[in-house]
Image (tube, rainbow, N blue to C red):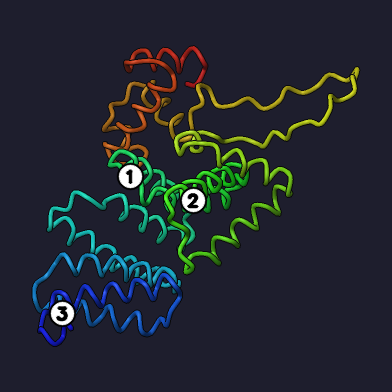
Amino acid sequence: MHRELGDKQSIAWSLFGLANMLFSSQGDPAKVHTLLEEGLALCSEMGHKEGMSWALSLFVEVFLQEGNAVKARLLLEEEMALSRELGHRQGPDESLFLLGRVEALEGDSAAARALYEESLALGREMGDDLNIPSYLEGLADVVAIQGEPAWATRIWGTAEALREARGTPLPPVYCADYERSVAAARTKLGKKAFDAAWAEGRNMTPEQALAAQGPVTLPQPFPAAPSSTPQAKSPTTSPGGLSARELEVLRLLATGLTDAQIAEQLVLSLHTIHAHLRTIYSKLGVTSRSAATRYAFEHQLV
């Protein structure tokens, strides 16, 4: 109908919509490429930069799924430049998440983790509830690779509960990779510990899940028999329930660095540092840098 009317902009959006549905449902990859290329050509012809930006984002996901990190990075850089030109205020958290996926595909789990954490902080700050489950799942993949399967499992549990509450199941195109990561964590933890961690995560908020590092504590069916052998102390949780990233920020703050210097040191944006500081102050029950610094010294964090 749009072709009959000669409505090029509507033709382009229809092409992008069909490409998105085919990609998400694991349709013909060649067809997805063809649809996106046709839509991009129309948008370029019209100078319709909004459509170009949207299509480039989807193309990034397509190339990531195909394992082509180089092409994905190039298109993402083009899309981010276009978004800045358009003055987009929405979507920077999505771009950070996609960049994190590029880093993960290239094997840099540390860089990927930092970007996923930043996308989560920014997404929560901007109220981007729709994408939070995806950001959590990306972070869970990375921390599982880094040797923290219990924490990853809690995060997956939280993401699953969010998807169920919002009616936004994981698209089929991502299911195989997701199931492989989850299965690997289950193998490392064992079924009982895995199920316990998953159940814990399902009852957590994203903020709680991000702070829930540490091993799984399995419920005891009955008290253990007394022993004359001194028992080792059980692992303690992070002071104040702070996440690893929040501890890093607190330690740097306690050394006297400014917010900008902390951002530079951790390779994060200033607004992400501000978001971390708000969470740190809330968890510690303080309202100032000096009080947070005092807490850090009293608890021997620096």
The quarter holding residue 167 reads bottom left
What amino acid type should be assigned to the residue bearing mark 3?
Leu
What amino acid type should be assigned to the residue bearing mark 2?
Glu
The correct choice, above or below, for 57 with respect to 200 in the image is below
Q: In the image as oriented, which residue stretches furthest toward the bottom?
A: 4
| Residue with the mark numbered 3 | 42
Q: Earlier in the sequence, mark 3 or mark 1?
A: 3
Residue at coordinates 13% horizontally, 74% vertically from top-left?
9
Percent from the top left, x then y, of residue 141? 53, 53
Residue at coordinates 71% horizontally, 43% vertically from top-left?
193
Task: Give the label on residue 164, or none.
Answer: 2
Percent from the top left, x then y, of residue 161? 51, 46
Residue at coordinates 55% horizontally, 26% vertically from top-left?
238
Secondary element at tag 2? helix
The correct choice, above or below, for 239 with respect to 4 in the image is above
Q: Earlier in the sequence, mark 2 or mark 1?
A: 1
The correct choice, above or below, for 8 with respect to 194 in the image is below
